[in-house]
Image (cartoon, rainbow, N blue to C red):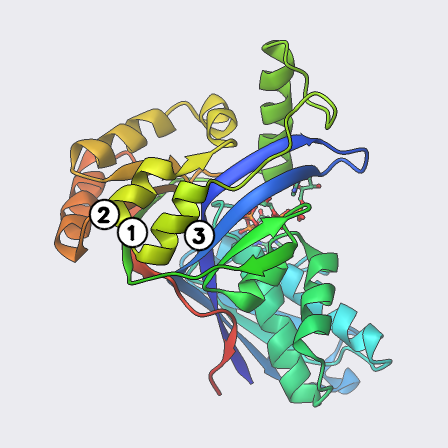
């Protein structure tokens, strides 16, 4: 059973104060984009070796993906098996195309794909609500990878409200050399807030809210209006940890992007383009500049995790 799962960009990431549990309250507007990982689950028996899922990974970034029990796809398979009182005997293969530690929720996509593919293989018939709840136990971005399209994530990002979208948005993603750690970027966001004297806790940071202009732009498919409303509260923290991102962002803007922003916790940078022609021009400029490892052109919205086999 193979599940195909999209990456995401956060067109708005409003970060509230740090909560007592260490997470941050969010108004997180997710948009699924057309870069995908595929997770294949096939039968395995204990005789094949090991107790838990047996994992293999292919793709250009495969060497950066952990193959031990910490892998989010393996954790997802174990969690689903435990919930259904069965052994997690399965072979999992991840065909990885989403940049690793890039702020595009690649690990979360693999967790969502493993939940869906194992549920089909094991015929455990888990409801979509229960799959999303299991996903939330694995990570804040996992429920969205199951749902796809566009959605507002509240709480720590796991409480989803689907959003309407009109038309197709054209994107370019500048993939950086090396990743950024999501917890480190949230910590840097707190540090910058404390250094600015505003405080970082939930009682000192205003409640994050989605922008109505942004939701309207998504609904009407108005790329220029979406560009004007996009914002990422983690961008300053990602740039503080990786100052060279400023050059990447400037390169895409100079090449005609309607807007440039860091994708989630970075370091991938996202550029919204007017149309597919403009996206190609932006991608070529980014590749020529040497400010990124690769530039990927794609469209949004994309569907959530889907079984393809
Ligand atoms: C940056 C985003 O990708 C935007 O969608 C997400 O907020 C991160 O989601 P994720 O990678 O699924 O993160 P999780 O695995 O849930 O949490 C990893 C770590 O990120 C930080 N974290 C995550 C989500 C959140 N709302 N507040 C946080 O402070 C915490 O330090 C947490 O221990
Ligand atoms: N299946 C997986 N694919 C990639 N990384 C994984 C996976 N499982 C665990 N990891 C670990 O998680 C870390 C973050 O990987 P991931 O690619 O999900 O980052 P990200 O895209 O920045 O996440 P997010 O956007 O959700 O914050 C990696 O450095 C790796 O150690």
Please give the residue where the numbered disc 3 appears in the rendered image.
99
State the residue at coordinates (19%, 50%).
279
Distance from label 1 to label 2 (Cα)? 6 Å
Distance from label 3 to label 1 (Cα)? 15 Å
In the image, is residue 205 above or below residue 285? above
State the residue at coordinates (17%, 31%).
254
Judged from this view, the residue extending furthest toward the bottom is: 123
Distance from label 3 to label 2 (Cα)? 20 Å
Left or right of residue 15, residue 18 in this image: right
Q: Point out residue 105 in the picture as x, y percentages from the top left corner.
A: 53, 53
Q: Looking at the image, how many numbered discs can be counted on the residues?
A: 3
Q: Secondary structure at mark 3?
A: loop
Q: Residues within 10 Å of mark 2 (few under 14, many from 20)?
A: many
Q: Nearer the viewer, residue 6 or 206?
A: 206
Q: Point out residue 229 in the picture as x, y percentages from the top left corner.
A: 37, 38
Please give the residue where the numbered disc 2 appears in the rendered image.
273
The first of marks 3 and 2 along the sequence is: 3
Within the image, what quadrant is residue 277 found in?
bottom left
Q: Residues within 10 Å of mark 3 (few under 14, many from 20)?
A: many
Q: Secondary structure at mark 2?
A: strand
Q: Nearer the viewer, residue 43 or 202?
A: 202
Residue 171 badge: 1
| Residue 179 in view (yes/no) | no
Q: Point out residue 123 in the picture as x, y percentages from the top left corner.
A: 70, 90
Q: Nearer the viewer, mark 3 or mark 1?
A: 1
| Residue 103 in view (yes/no) | yes
Q: Are marks 1 and 2 in contact (CB under 8 Å)?
A: yes
Q: Secondary structure at mark 1?
A: strand
Within the image, what quadrant is residue 188 found in?
top right
């Amino acid at each position: 059973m193979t599940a195909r799962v999209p990456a995401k960009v956060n067109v708005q990431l409003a970060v509230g104060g740090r909560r007592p549990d260490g997470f941050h309250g969010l108004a997180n507007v997710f948009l699924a984009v057309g870069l995908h990982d595929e997770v294949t689950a096939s039968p395995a028996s204990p005789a094949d070796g090991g107790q838990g899922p047996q994992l293999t990974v292919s793709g250009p970034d495969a060497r950066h993906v952990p193959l031990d029990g910490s892998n989010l796809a393996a954790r997802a398979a174990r969690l689903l098996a435990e919930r259904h009182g069965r052994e997690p005997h399965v072979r999992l293969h991840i065909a990885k195309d989403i940049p690793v530690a890039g702020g595009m929720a690649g690990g979360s996509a693999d967790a969502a794909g493993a939940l869906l593919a194992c549920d089909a293989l094991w015929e455990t018939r888990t409801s979509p609500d229960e799959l999303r709840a299991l996903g939330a136990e694995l990570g804040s971005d996992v429920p969205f990878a199951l749902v796809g399209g566009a959605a507002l994530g509240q709480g720590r990002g796991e409480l989803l409200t689907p959003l309407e979208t009109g038309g197709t948005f054209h994107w370019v993603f500048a993939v950086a050399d090396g990743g950024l750690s999501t917890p480190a970027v949230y910590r840097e966001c707190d540090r910058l807030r404390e250094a600015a004297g505003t405080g970082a806790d939930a009682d000192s940071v205003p409640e994050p809210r989605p922008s109505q202009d942004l939701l309207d732009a998504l609904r009407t498919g108005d790329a220029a209006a979406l560009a004007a409303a996009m914002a990422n509260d983690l961008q300053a923290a990602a740039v503080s940890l990786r100052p060279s991102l400023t050059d990447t962002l400037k390169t895409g803007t100079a090449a005609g992007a309607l807007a440039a922003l860091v994708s989630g916790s970075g370091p991938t940078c996202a550029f919204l383009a007017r149309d597919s022609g403009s996206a190609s021009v932006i991608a070529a400029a980014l590749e020529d500049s040497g400010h990124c490892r690769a530039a990927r052109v794609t469209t949004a919205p994309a569907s959530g995790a889907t079984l393809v086999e």
